[in-house]
Amino acid sequence: MTLVRTDVHRPSAIEPADYDYVAFECVPKSGDLLGDCGFQLAERAKIRTHFECTGGTYSQHAHGGNCMVCGNANAIYTVLFHHRPSNTYVRMGQDCAEKVDAQYPRDMFVSFKRTAEEERRARAGKAKARRFLEDRSLAAAWAVWEASGPSPSDDHFTVKDVVSKLVRYGSISEKQVGFLRFLLRKIADRPQVEARRAAEREAAAPVPVTDARVLVEGEVVSVKVVDGNYGRQTKILVKADAGWKVYGTCPSVLLGVERGERVRFTAAVTPSRDDPKFGFFSRPVAGEEPQAAPAPSVDADAAIPF
């Protein structure tokens, strides 16, 4: 038996002038209501405020769907109106709102729908990305990506960048997967590495304080080319075997040296004013500074002529 509607909100009885626009709603048949999204929260706040002012309620008439005028169950995005004569609220799908000539900000409704659809796609992308990482035992990368606040290290920043690409594009290469594993290992090992470095720093000897040139022998920690008052120069940071570090212009005979290589040269060194275990070197000479040759020993008997 077909229900014959007699309510005032049936299409044939609608009086557009009796309806005032309130807000927009997103009411899917199932799934995420997007209730924690800013745009949705703003609309719901408008609805609560309006309800508090009128004391009205949603209309209880039988309609069969999300659109409370035509009964369309597929109307996910609806416009909420307040019916002044009955002090009730009625959802209308966009088609019904247009047909009854109800007044509402159409441009804002289009924007509301677009924002909701973009959020749904973003959430679907996030869910897919999370499954992708979990299937490869990389859930820690997702935790790094979700963490709020500034990245505590360059490694954290890079992990976030790679995961963002996964969320956006839906996949990453196996090379990028391997890179994530490498970065996560570095992040996990960071406390131990920092503790070891702190212990090494504590045990390091201070930069020698002397007017004489010092033998600098150790490992190159960094190499970089800089432009200064004397043109382009190669600067190196060397960690001496005794633990102290010095920074300065690379000797010309050592140009081309790379990080991790060992070097040996003599130079004047000056400790930093802020850190006795760090300093600067100047006037470097490759190798040890030549020492005066000892005088040859003389055999007194051999010196006596025959």
Image (cartoon, helix red, strand yellow):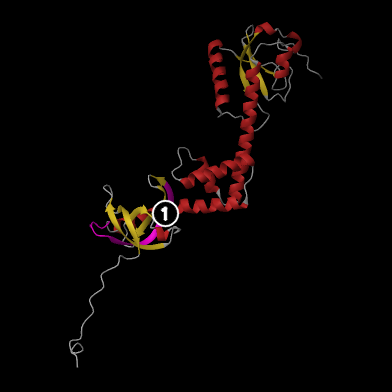
Look at 45% across and 39% down and name the residue there.
Answer: 150
Q: Position of residue 38 (x, y in %)?
A: 55, 26
> For this rendering, which residue is in front, 230 or 303?
303
Q: Main secondary structure of the magenta part?
A: strand
Specify the quadrant of the image occupied by residue 85.
top right
Q: Which residue is mark 1?
A: 222
> For this rendering, which residue is in front, 1 or 238?
238
Q: Position of residue 152 (x, y in %)?
A: 43, 43
Which three-letter amino acid code belongs to the residue tagged 1? Ser
> For this rendering, which residue is in front, 108 or 228?
228
Against 65, residue 241 (above or below) is below
Q: Is residue 100 left or right of residue 84?
A: right
Do we see residue 173 in this rendering?
yes
Does the segment drawn in magenta span residue 224?
Answer: yes
Q: Which residue, as the protein is rendered here, is positioned at the far right?
A: 1
Q: Which residue, as the protein is rendered here, is positioned at the far front?
A: 306
Query: What range is drawn magenta here?
Result: 207-226
Look at 47% across and 46% down and name the residue there.
Answer: 154
Quarter of the image for the N terminus: give it: top right
Against 294, residue 141 (above or below) is above
Specify the quadrant of the image occupied by residue 46.
top right
How many numbered marks appear? 1
Packing grade of label 1 (10 A; few <14, some 14-19, many >=20) is some
Quarter of the image for the C terminus: give it: bottom left
Q: Is residue 304 left or right of residue 148?
A: left
Q: Is residue 3 left or right of residue 260?
A: right
> For this rendering, which residue is in front, 214 or 100?
214
Provide the secondary structure element on which disc 1 rests. strand
Q: Position of residue 155 (x, y in %)?
A: 48, 47
